[in-house]
């Protein structure tokens, strides 16, 4: 039998726009999960909205956020720790109503943390359980 692999899918329950300033942790508002195998995605506490890496390995992450801002904006799946603050995937957008989406694979070490951040200007994200999701899992 194959052991459970750490995996999560997170979203924000409350529907509506939230405006995030530059450097904000967007995923901190995404405290509900469709799954959270192992509990490594933190839904409360100091690391709320972050996936705390349980073991060294290759990980896959993806995001799909509903952009409700006009103008050019950038959000990113970001990680910190052994990788010293690295963007796994960044996405720019210039049309309200289009999604920020992206994915990536990265080697991480135990204790590293991964989250979604707003990189530049204030950005409005529309949240609810059917929009603005992000997920990740251990590949091996």
Image (cartoon, rainbow, N blue to C red):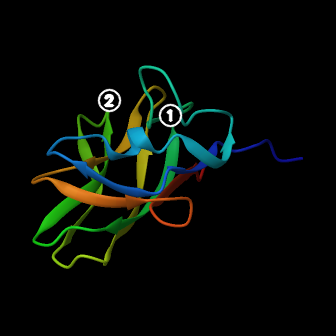
The earlier-in-sequence mark between 2 and 1 is: 1
16 up-or-down from 12: above or below? below
Q: Position of residue 40 (x, y in %)?
A: 58, 33
Residue at x-position 47% and y-position 57% = 15
Q: Check disc 2: other Cα within 10 Å, few if <14, some if 14-19, many if 20+.
A: some
Q: Quadrant of residue 112?
A: top left
Are the two marked residues, 2 and 1, in contact with CB atoms closer than 8 angstroms? Answer: yes
Mark 1 falls on what kind of element?
A: loop
Front residue of this view, candidates 74 and 104: 74
Q: Position of residue 66 (x, y in %)?
A: 37, 68
Determine the residue located farthest toward the right in the rendered image. Answer: 1
Image-based side of 3 in relation to 31, left or right: right
Give me the C-alpha separation between circle 2 and circle 1. 10 Å
Residue at x-position 42% and y-position 42% = 29
Q: Residue 27 — which label?
A: none
116 up-or-down from 111: above or below? below
Q: Position of residue 107 (x, y in %)?
A: 42, 46
Mark 2 falls on what kind of element?
A: loop
Q: Position of residue 89 (x, y in %)?
A: 30, 60
Q: Name the residue that disc number 2 marks.
A: 81
Residue at x-position 23% and y-position 38% = 85
Image-based side of 27 in relation to 22, left or right: right
Q: Check disc 1: other Cα within 10 Å, few if <14, some if 14-19, many if 20+.
A: many
Front residue of this view, candidates 75 and 113: 75
Q: Residue 53 — which label?
A: 1
């Amino acid at each position: 039998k194959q052991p459970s692999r750490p995996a999560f899918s997170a979203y924000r329950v409350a529907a509506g726009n939230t405006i995030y300033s530059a450097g904000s942790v967007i995923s901190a508002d995404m405290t509900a999960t469709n799954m959270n195998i192992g509990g490594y995605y933190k839904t409360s506490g100091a690391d709320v909205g972050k996936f705390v890496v349980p073991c060294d390995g290759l990980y896959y992450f993806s995001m799909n956020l509903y952009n409700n801002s006009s103008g050019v904006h950038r959000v990113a799946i970001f990680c910190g720790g052994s990788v010293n603050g690295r963007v796994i995937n960044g996405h720019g957008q210039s049309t309200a109503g289009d999604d920020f989406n992206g994915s990536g694979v990265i080697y991480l070490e135990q204790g590293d943390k991964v989250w979604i951040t707003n990189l530049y200007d204030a950005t409005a994200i529309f949240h609810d359980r059917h929009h603005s999701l992000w997920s990740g899992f251990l590949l091996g």
